[in-house]
Amino acid sequence: MVEPAEQRAAVTYAMAEYATSERHACRLLEVPRGTHRYQRRPDRNRSLRLEVRRLAAQHPRWGLRRIWILVKKKRPKIGRHRVGRIWREEKLQVKRRTRKRLVREKAAETSVNRRNQRWAMDFVADRLADGRALRIFTLVDVFTREDLALEVDLSLSGERVKRVLEQVVEERGARPEDIRVDNGPEFLSSTLTQWCAEKQIKLNYIQPGRPMQNGHVESFNGKLRDECLNQHWFVTLSQARLILAAWKRHYNEERPHSSLGNKTPSEFVAGMSFAPEIVDTAEQPPAQGDPAGELRSALTQRPFCRPRAEI
């Protein structure tokens, strides 16, 4: 939409350039003659306008209401709507700070059918009795459901995460092909990304706001919260480390998993050395906790027994 000031300028230009009358120029440009003849009245809000602009420059993050409160202290009869008109005419509206959101494509879903093929890691938050925040780093093997690490401290950086991963890789004698993670600053740090690149480990980042894409570690975090963190009141950091270490042993060696055929992760790993028997599982439902049925072949493994020799 053309502003009235621009319309008046266009009519004035046509009259001067083509030596035509005002009536003719207004008819051609479809501008009312009253608009062209309008004479702007003196701004009766000039002093108020200058004061509003000064306050807005002095407080750039303040909105209309706070500016009007300051104006009202000096000019009690000034209404909010009058200040609001000046506010809009001067275009002093405070711009909202929009947060830049990270955009990622959804990671391709691939079947997991062996140990150390994919790990998943995340953080869990808790507090000590004195109110200090605790951060717990969790690391699981997606295939065997093993709890590989439970590192707890008041703060955990990307360097600390790298050291824990190095220790786990050394203990297991193998490194994963990829690790499923969220977009936390520790997992985006250059320290961790460079180390993974050197070890040829792919970091699979989930989409922001989609924790279900890292469902295995989220499920583990829920069990950790329900069975351990909610059952204890940590007084000191050393106590929290002892309790979490004991719960890690219990989780790996004593707690049965329905997704592993009601075996513990240790029992499941011990049975992986036997050759699997090929069976027809076309009509069997997927294992609980594994919608893709990725563990079905491992759950049907039976030891190969050589017939006893007749005496």
Image (cartoon, grey):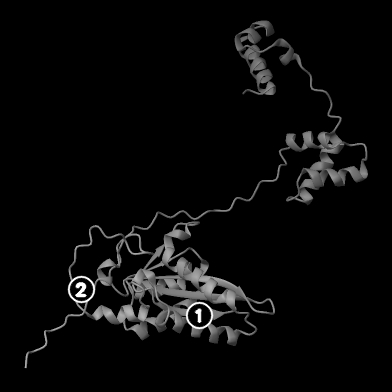
Q: Image height check: is 239 above or below 23?
A: below
Give the x, y percent position of residue 133.
Answer: 63, 75
Does residue 201 appear in this view?
no
Q: How many marks?
A: 2
Closer to the camera in the image, 137 or 84: 137
Q: Quadrant of residue 173?
A: bottom left
Closer to the camera in the image, 85 or 165: 165
Dot 2 or dot 1, earlier in sequence: 1
Q: Which quarter shows the C terminus? A: bottom left
Give the x, y percent position of residue 98.
Answer: 60, 50
Give the x, y percent position of residue 262.
Answer: 36, 73
What amino acid does circle 2 point to?
Pro
Secondary structure of the residue carrying tag 2 is loop
Q: Which quarter shows the N terminus? A: top right
The residue carrying mark 2 is 276
The residue carrying mark 1 is 151
Secondary structure of the residue carrying tag 1 is strand
Q: Image height check: is 80 above or below 216?
A: above
What amino acid does circle 1 point to?
Glu
Q: Residue furthest front?
A: 311
Mark 2 or mark 1, whichever is nearer to me: 2
* 88 sits to left or right of 200: right
Residue at left 75%, top 14%?
37
Closer to the camera in the image, 63 or 29: 63
What is the crowding at mark 1: few (fewer than 14 residues within 10 Å), some, or many (at least 20)?
A: some
